[in-house]
Image (cartoon, coloured by chain):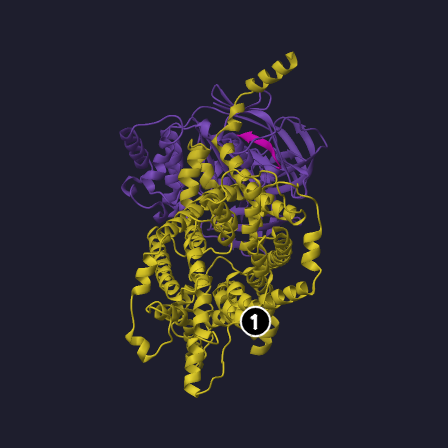
Chain colours: A yellow, B purple
Amino acid sequence: MEAAGRLSTSWLARPGWWHRLDLKWVVIGLSIALVAWLALVPLFFLLWQSFFTPQTAAKAAQFTLGNYASAYSSFETLRLLANSLQFGAGTAVFAFLLGAFLAWINERTNTPFKSLFFALSLIPLVIPNILFTVSWILLASPKIGILNLALQHWFGTTMVFFNIYSMTGMIWVDGLHYSPMAFLLMTAAFRSMDPCLEESALMSGATVLQVARRITLRLAWPAVLASLLILFVRAIESFEVPALLGLPVGIEVYTSAIFQAIRQYPSQTGLASAFGVTLLVIAGVGLYFQSRLSTRGSRYSTVTGKGFRPRPMNLGPWRYATAAVFVLYLAVVVVLPFLVLLWSSLHKYYSVPSAGALQNLTLQPYRTVLEFPGLARAVWNSVLLSLGAATLIMLVTAVISWIVVKTRLPGRVWLDHLASLPLVFPGLVLGLSIMIFYLNFRIGVYGTLWIMLIAYVTRFLPYGLRYNMTSMMQIHKELEESAAMSGAGWGSTFRRIVLPLLKPGLIAGWIYIVIVSIRELSSSILLYSPGSEVVSIVIWELWQNGQYVELSALGVMFIIVLLAFVMLAQWAGSKMGIKEA
Amino acid sequence: MLSVKGLYTEYPNERGQPVKAVQDVSFEVPEGKLFTLLGPSGCGKTTTLRSIAGLERPQCGEIRAGSRIVYSSEKGIFVAPNERQFGMVFQSYAIWPHMNVFQNAAFPLEVGHRRHGRKEIQDRVMRVLKAVALEHLADREATNLSGGQQQRLALARAIVMEPQLLLLDEPLSNLDAKLRERMRFELKRLQRELNLTTVYVTHDQSEALALSHEIAVMDEGRIVQVGTPRQIYDTPGNRFVADFVGTTNFLEGSVLAAEPGACRVATAVGSIAVRSLDGLARDARVLVSVRPEDVELFERLPDGVNGRNVCQGTVDSKAFLGEHIDFQVKVRDHLLLAKAHTSLRTPVGGCIYVVMDPEKCIAIPG
């Protein structure tokens, strides 16, 4: 007793002991706890669920390997794996070839209107995948696809030219959708390659082909592999395309199999979890090698800080051909999808373009959609969720990146890994594990907007972290130290020095997260309940109900609002002195 | 005013082994004086300065400013940097790019425990900007300042709260040579006018000699000599100081005679008289240091060289540097560097007399 008393008084008497509990440590502690909670809970419960029987009122959950047994015992499983790999690999290769070719045109040739093409080719990033998929159904479905009908009319046959409901169709649509990502990745790779390396090879007497084979390709190799891997992971995780194009004709991949397992009655969460774990492992392995390659790639990268402007290759008259490639690309990824949505949104019933149909143009679908019960609520939910998630993520990751970059706390690298962990979760799997957790631990978030906020924050946390990390590393430590020497405490320094200096990354990341959360579907689809629908769920429901024209009307408005938001945000960002968002 | 006692700091290196950055560093800085920590990079001078600032926490020692203990390992005291109220100018200046000149300088008055009224802030900031001749740029974005202006703004920000102590971490090293020389005088003037107790860290010996009241030369984490600029330059205590501060000729030798007033050392250029030094014993191995500007060259032996060291040599090479000529003179196979007036035009290979004042030949215990 006496000893305890002495201990506590000596503890108290130690000068400044309460400094340890000041604002700095409270904020740091809370941020770490939040990240750990968000990242570890879904992982743990997904694993747990996959090894246990469903808990019922009569029977407690029991350990079982049955889920894995039923997931892996049948011939179906092999087909599932084969389909998934085929879909993932096909999409990755297609998107990569397209993106890399465009990036090469844009970075290393003298194609006219390059900067305009660059800006335009980023538009598809804004279009939600579900709308992109729907528009391609309207374009290339065997029965109602405009392209099919037009060609059939042209050649006077009944032959089906394009069948979007096929593996090829799925790869085509998803590959197109991910091509801007490949384009950005390869643009970065081309930009970080110093043309001096190629020029010095030329001066050594190598031919253009030898330079390409022995220098350019070797240097770009890590970036190429890393891009392929990340595209593969994204493709294998994608949900919209397999659900809309694969399921109607029985082509199942992991994501759609998980969705089916949950949606059937009674829902088989255990089986879904077993599939989910498999998907997680594939994504985890892919991303692990991708990050290894990227670190190796950065050793190859030759950015010196001084901007170099490579002398673009003169294509001569071929430059009009490459410009035509860009125009064609934009037609396929932006113009055609948007036009077909616009066309179908102007009719009472969906009809293919013809002179007759032109007479029946109407704005009725817009009226119907706007009067749709619950649309206002869904829009409000979407806005609330995306703004909330973006703000929360950027603030929390600002603290996290500060800890990782600026402090010498032991284990700070693990904090980085922890906050990046959600990257391996496909949206659907994340939704699944969050659903399972909050179903079992009823703390009042299940069936509310909160559970979706949790899912969004978890899912997009790694993106926010990367944006903040990049800016944080550019802040010289003396800028903070001089604030401390000026008498500012941690709170004032963070608020008045660190956050303002972080602003470029903070705002760019915030815009990005707003966009990706407002079009989020694959997590939301397992978590929404009546009253907490979001816009992408409304689109999904309209599709399920076959209300194509209303869907198109909503889609057109959605895309226009998103584009307007991006432009406004970019403009506001540039006003505040941000060069590149 | 500032007293540093027994400072000891170590870091773990990449392999986790401790590296001693600062060992047993002690010194005193009287009120209103400018004290310089001089040494090559990695000698521990910046670590010492950052420990005084509170940006680093040493393992051992005590730091006291006036009557206030800001760090004591024995008493378990560590005052956070923002509580110490010292001003500091960083090597990179650390001007906040999202604020303008006025906001940068006003920041120290707006944060912390002591709050100031708007009017008072305005007055004090404008006064300090005037002192560094930036008052006409108060509304300028901080990013649009030149290097010299940024340096002055950093100084203004450091002194606006009238700190007890001013810490300068290589403040001139990012400026070009011309500007550096001008800012040297500026700094000296401000320090004297405002009577600021200052600790100055630099690796530039001419800066240290020009600015300081007192210099501590550091090497490998220790202070190797403390003294006024004149003492440091004229009577270096060891080989490192003689070599690091200025350029010098070293002559190895052994003591022939150690009587006060008549010390002689046998060297490669012959027996020379050196400045008397206590504790010099007969036959002891010593190093004689002679600054190049103290090596006088004559084509014909002048009168009145009695008592001075005279040797004969040949010109080995020479370099014209504008304000003087560097001569390398070969005396008995040993090369001596000499700074000579540009009027001396002895050709390479020519015969020349070397004269050295014994008072300028410093024997350093080898």
The quarter of the rendered structure image containing the C terminus of chain A is bottom left
B142 or B347: nearer the viewer: B142
Q: Label 1: which residue?
A: A167
Give the residue drawn at x 50%, y 36%.
B201
x, y percent for residue A467: 48, 51
A470 or B293: nearer the viewer: A470
Subunit ID for the residue under disc 1: A
Circle 1: residue type: Met
Q: Residue furthest bottom?
A: A156
Residue A6 left/right relative to A34: right
Which stretch is magenta?
Answer: B220-227
Q: Residues within 10 Å of mark 1 (few under 14, many from 20)?
A: some
Give the residue drawn at x 49%, y 35%.
A27
Specify the principal SS of the magenta part: strand
Q: Residue furthest top?
A: A2
Residue B355 seen in render: no
- Count of residue discs: 1
The quarter of the rendered structure image containing the N terminus of chain A is top right
Residue A378 seen in render: yes
Query: Is residue A52 one of those drawn in magenta?
Result: no
x, y percent for residue B31: 44, 24
x, y percent for residue A116: 38, 68
Residue A545 left/right relative to B246: left
